[in-house]
Amino acid sequence: MMQSSTVQFSKLRAVTTSALAVVLLALAGFGCGATKPSGASFASVLIKGRTAQEIANVTAQVFQEEGYVGGSMKGHPMVFQKEGSRMTDIAYQGIVDTHYGAGTVVRVKVDIVSAGAETHRLQCQAYVVRNAGDGFFEEEQRLANIRSGPYRALLNKVADRLK
């Protein structure tokens, strides 16, 4: 009986250790985004010494050069869109629907937030949109932070042009 208790305790300890490891790995997955403001966790860059309008103008230029349309500064956030790739269509619409013409749109919402004395944070969040433009069936699906690389690169390009 003593041996059975020891075996059960060892199994319990192994399960507990495994569960703790999973939790720690999940927390590690948050990376630097865990310390940023929620709006900046996907992609953001700090820009010093420029006005919000200057930042907005360069942001619109950079996104338009990359094939996006939209970006009016009148409404916050600025919204840019472009047609999703064939692979994005298949991933989000399925092979059959894509074959029959269903497509996706990549939508990026960009905002300029004051971050103190003469500093602004340019931040964005990207979405894949099914049935874009359909008032009833349109569905935005937020991209995970792990997929933020191309959008960080766009924001960095804006910051580089403003230096």
Image (tube, grey):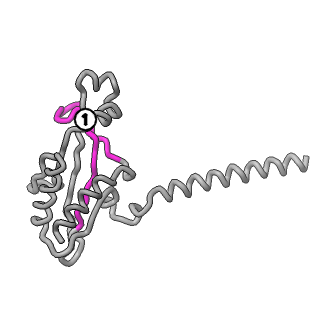
Q: Is residue 125 magenta?
A: yes
The quadrant of the image that shows the C terminus is bottom left
Q: Is residue 98 above or below residue 31?
A: above
- Judging depth in this view, the residue of 4 and 22 nearest the camera is 22
What's the residue at 62%, 51% (across, down)?
A: 19
Name the residue rendered at 71%, 51% in the picture.
Answer: 14
Q: Label the magenta part by its dominant secondary structure.
A: strand
Q: Residue furthest right?
A: 1
Provide the residue designation for mark 1. Answer: 104
Q: Residue at x 78, y 51 (%)?
A: 10
Q: Quadrant of residue 124?
A: bottom left
Which residue is drawn at the image coordinates 35% and 34% (left, top)?
91
Helix, strand or loop at label 1? It is strand
Residue 3: % across, % down: 89, 48
Q: Position of residue 15 (x, y in %)?
A: 68, 49
Determine the image quadrant of residue 58.
Answer: bottom left
Relative to 53, say whether 134 is above or below.
Answer: above
Residue type highlighted by circle 1: Thr
Q: Please tell me how crowded label 1 is: few (under 14), some (14-19), or many (20+) other residues with Cα within 10 Å.
A: many
- From the viewer's perspective, is residue 67 above or below residue 88? below
| Relative height, residue 105 to residue 60 (above, below) | above
Q: Which residues are magenta?
A: 121-143
